[in-house]
Image: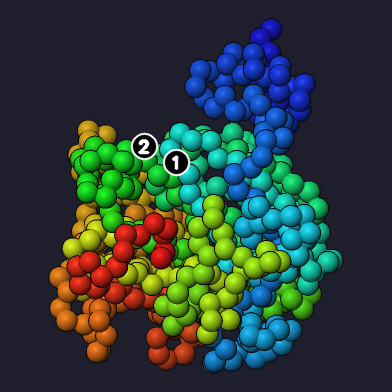
Amino acid sequence: MRKTFSRRDLIKIAGGTVAAAAGASLLPRYLGKGWLSPLATNSAGAQEIAPDLYFAATDGWIGLPPSPALPPYHPDDLAPAPFTTYIFGFRNVTGLTVDQVRYQKMRAQHSAPLFWADEGATLRLQLTNLGLQMRPDLVDAHTLHWHGFRHVIPFFDGEPMGSVSVPIDRNFTYVFRPRDPGTYMYHCHVEDIEHVHMGMTGMVFVRPAQNGQGFYQSGRYAYNDGDGSTGYDREFSMLLTEVWSEAHWDDSHIQLPEWTDYRVDFGLINGRAYPDTLAPSGSVDPFNPVRDANGDLIPTPGYEHLQYQPISSLVTCNEGERVLLRFANLGFTEGAMTTAGLKMRIVGRDATLMRGITDVDTSYLTNTISLGAGESADAIFTAPAYRGGSNGQPYDTYLLYNRATTHGSNAGTAGYGGQMTEIRVYPTGTLPVQTVPNT
């Protein structure tokens, strides 16, 4: 009788040294040619190779607009100044010493560190679990799940029912070889309702093999379009998340939230609520992080409350440039992101180029894009001609905001807030060439 091969058998092959060696001959027989990357036969060895990136999972505090207050939940009475809100999250600890890594406990950031990979290139990302300083009673494991990654090797999926999770004081190295360009997101998949909402969410994108080709002047593209239609000059990631203040307060005060009462108190873009979305970025480049002597994030002067929210949502560009907006939604509710006075061309959805099976262009122009939970989109707009500045400033201002009323204010009050930012257009040649996203 022919032997069958189960999912559990695959994980055993990926996880054990002896089984991994045996899997090199068994996998093609049972799974078919090309179904898995060759990395699947060397999963144990992957844990011994130095990673490209090293992330830590822990807890911490962030700063949201303190007014209006939502007593007793916001601001949290346990939060040290100048912060307001308890979170779980990730930190980039690449290149730090063991002692410096341990020092990052209780210093999580939101949104989680941005990172990217090249199509077809191997990326190794090590995850360590530092535990939760405010909640030592919670001994949760953590994972890093690359949401939307096609044909992922189960061992590296980060879904704890079918792969492995990382206990406290342990490390695990994920190995990815992405083959599909586009915009993705990642999150912890353990106790995911809680961990996702508490802030263990970030963005990742895959750069296409077409980069460097001459279809568009910058040589940078969102997809392998073959004609330059997804070429861009600048790119900005926009991760949409939400804060229900009661749930965050409950976690810091050893309480249990009633999730059926869920509501959005603060809508966030890249971990910030307007007007903080306009503040400058801190350290964004994951491969060249800027930190202090202890390995901690360095706050921008005047924005100390945003020390652990380093990614700005302010969009800046010169007139005539193409700007790529990479949207992803890891909130629990639908968003409708709108550009007032500008048209965006939607060139990709869920890391898929907008082309039909016969290569027909299905991209479209719009000023509003709807994003359900777990969805991503790539939108490109061309910066209009400079018109002399807005409100005495040397740039023209256009708003980018969520039309959902629950996401466009802070704590449900009147006035602007939540998931809103600005697009600022400068005269030709004002801004230098962008080298890192969101800068």
The front one of 191 and 175 is 175
**Residue 402 visible in the shown view:** no
- Residue 31 sits in quarter: top right
Q: Position of residue 279 (x, y in %)?
A: 45, 78
Residue type beneath disc 2:
Ala
Tell whether 311 sits left or right of 96.
left
Judged from the image, the secondary structure of the residue bearing numbered disc 1 is strand
For the residue marked with disc 1, what is the amino acid? Asp
CA distance for labels 2 and 1: 7 Å
**Residue 40 on image: x %, y %:** 62, 27
- The answer to whether mark 2 and mark 1 are in CB contact below 8 A is yes
Name the quadrant of the N terminus: top right
The image shows residue 355, relative to residue 137, as above or below, that is above
Q: Residue at x 68, y 13 (%)?
A: 3
Q: Is residue 219 left or right of residue 46?
A: left
Callout 1 crowding tier (Cα within 10 Å): few <14, some 14–19, many ≥20:
some
Count of marks, rendered view: 2
| Quadrant hosting residue 96 | bottom right
Q: Which residue is mark 1?
A: 118
Q: Position of residue 126 (x, y in %)?
A: 66, 46
Name the secondary structure under disc 2: loop
Q: Classify 10 Å Cα crowding around label 2: few (below 14), some (14-19), many (20 and above).
A: some
The residue positioned 61% from the left and 19% from the top of the image is 27
- Percent position of residue 234, x then y: 32, 59
Mark 2 or mark 1: whose residue is earlier in sequence: 1
Labelled disc at residue 209: 2
